[in-house]
Image (cartoon, rainbow, N blue to C red):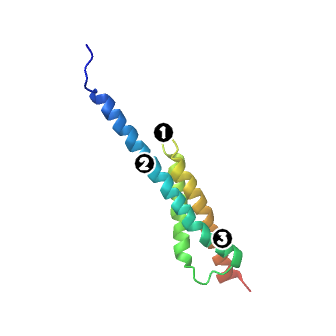
Amino acid sequence: MASKTTPFFVLHKNRIMEQELLYEICAYTGSIAMILGYLPQAFQTIRTRNTDGISLPAFLMMAIGSFCFMLQGFVHKPDIIWSIAITNLITTICSWVVFAIKMHNDYFKD
């Protein structure tokens, strides 16, 4: 005779799967938001070469922070955390490009 109650381990496994799904949704939503937050500034800076309103220390710190988070995503064990790794790869590139243009404008422009 079969029991009409669901075993605890099935309920626990379903809850874990729901939490993992929520984690992934939050991770990828945050990734998209971060990328969309960086890209307009990077594109605007590349297009106009105007860096007057950009803080050099702020973009340096953002570039370093993005780089460290990118490394964290790629070296995470046992699996790579792709949402962190790819997002921060893109934001690292954007930050370094803006930083380089800012450095050129402030210190190397004739």
Residue for badge 3: 43
| Labelled pair 1, 2 in contact (Cβ < 8 Å) | no
Q: State which quarter of the image contains the N terminus.
A: top left
- Check disc 3 and give the amino acid type: Phe
Number of residue marks: 3
- Check disc 2 and give the amino acid type: Tyr
Residue for badge 1: 78
List x then y, in percent, for residue 46: 69, 73
Please report whichever mark, 3 or 2, sits nearer to the chain's N-terminal start.
2
Q: Is residue 33 left or right of residue 15?
A: right
List x then y, in percent, for residue 80: 52, 44
Provide the secondary structure element on which disc 1 rests: loop
Please report whichever mark, 1 or 3, sits nearer to the chain's N-terminal start.
3
Of residues 67 and 51, the one nearer the viewer is 51
The local crowd at label 2, few if under 14, some if 14 to 19, many if 20 or more residues have their Cα within 10 Å, is few
Of residues 100 and 54, the one nearer the viewer is 54
Residue for badge 2: 23
- Check disc 1 and give the amino acid type: Pro
* Residue at the spot 47% in from the left edge and 52% down from the top edge: 27
Q: Residue furthest right?
A: 110
List x then y, in percent, for residue 60: 55, 71
Provide the secondary structure element on which disc 3 rests: helix
* Residue at the spot 41% in from the left edge and 47% down from the top edge: 22
Cα–Cα gap, marks 1 and 2: 17 Å
Cα–Cα gap, marks 3 and 2: 30 Å
Q: State which quarter of the image contains the C terminus.
A: bottom right
Please report whichever mark, 1 or 2, sits nearer to the chain's N-terminal start.
2
Between disc 1 and disc 2, the foreground one is 2
Between disc 1 and disc 3, the foreground one is 3
> Which of the 4 quarters of the picture holds residue 9?
top left
Q: Is the residue 72 above or below the residue 109 in the image? A: above
- What numbered label is drawn on residue 51? none
